[in-house]
Amino acid sequence: MAIVSLEAFLAAVPPGLPLAGLDLGTKTIGLALSDRGWGFATPRAVIRRKKFTPDAAALKKALDDENVVGIVVGLPLNMDGSEGPRAQSSRAFMRNYSALDERPALFWDERLSTVAVERAMISADVSRAKRAERIDSAAAAFILQGALDRLASLRV
């Protein structure tokens, strides 16, 4: 797998199969999948993090089960655009994961994605407990939807 630019990602992924969105947290990996037409993203169950090897195996199995052809990974940049420890951690995870999976991956700026999702959940009157259990996958869907919208504009 290679970490590629947006244009290279679009050229590398065949249409008609789903893409995955990831929100790499410290305790969970939020997962979302696109539809086959790349129109919308849907949250899926989170993967509880343990250590890299079981995390990577669980992620690969989930992606294989859904015939995913490409991965959009949230990159948590600082508000000034610089990369802090969380962004470096995401890059390190994907660098290690790339040895196990050949699917192309694209980093996507995820600044404020969790904040936007949490605000939407609060306005929808989702309880604090349910928000905590769903926030990472909803953030992954938010990240993936942003990438899908951009890909759609490039495909026209």
Image (tube, rainbow, N blue to C red):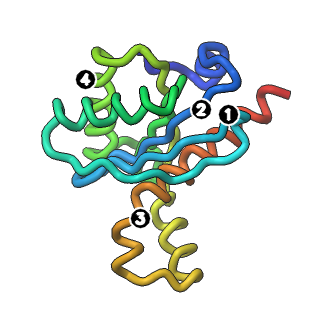
Q: Nearer the viewer, mark 1 or mark 3?
A: 1
Give the residue number, with chain letter if any, for mark 1: 36
Give the residue number, with chain letter if any, for mark 3: 134
**Whether residue 110 is situated above or below residue 1 in the rendered picture:** below
Q: Secondary structure at mark 2?
A: loop
In front of the other: 44 or 124: 44
Q: Earlier in the sequence, mark 4 or mark 3?
A: 4
Separation of marks 4 and 2 at Cα, in angstroms:
23 Å
**Whether residue 110 is situated above or below residue 117 in the rendered picture:** above
Q: Secondary structure at mark 3?
A: helix
Cβ–Cβ under 8 Å for marks 1 and 2: yes
- Find residue 77 and report its horizontal and vertical position in percent: 42, 46
In front of the other: 109 or 29: 29
Describe residue 33's horizontal placement relative to residue 3 as left or right.
right
Separation of marks 1 and 3 at Cα, in angstroms:
23 Å
Q: Secondary structure at mark 4?
A: helix
Give the residue number, with chain letter if any, for mark 2: 18
- Dot 2, crowdedness within 10 Å: few (<14), some or many (≥20)? many
Tally the marks.
4
Describe residue 128's horizontal placement relative to residue 42 as left or right.
left
Separation of marks 1 and 2 at Cα, in angstroms:
5 Å
Q: Secondary structure at mark 1?
A: loop
Q: Earlier in the sequence, mark 1 or mark 2?
A: 2
Q: Nearer the viewer, mark 4 or mark 2?
A: 2
Q: Earlier in the sequence, mark 1 or mark 4?
A: 1
Describe residue 97's horizontal placement relative to residue 156 as left or right.
left
Disc marking residue 96: 4
Which amino acid, mark 2? Answer: Pro
**Could you tell me which quadrant the N terminus lies in?**
top left
Q: Look at 61% across and 25% down and name the residue there.
A: 6
Separation of marks 4 and 3 at Cα, in angstroms:
26 Å
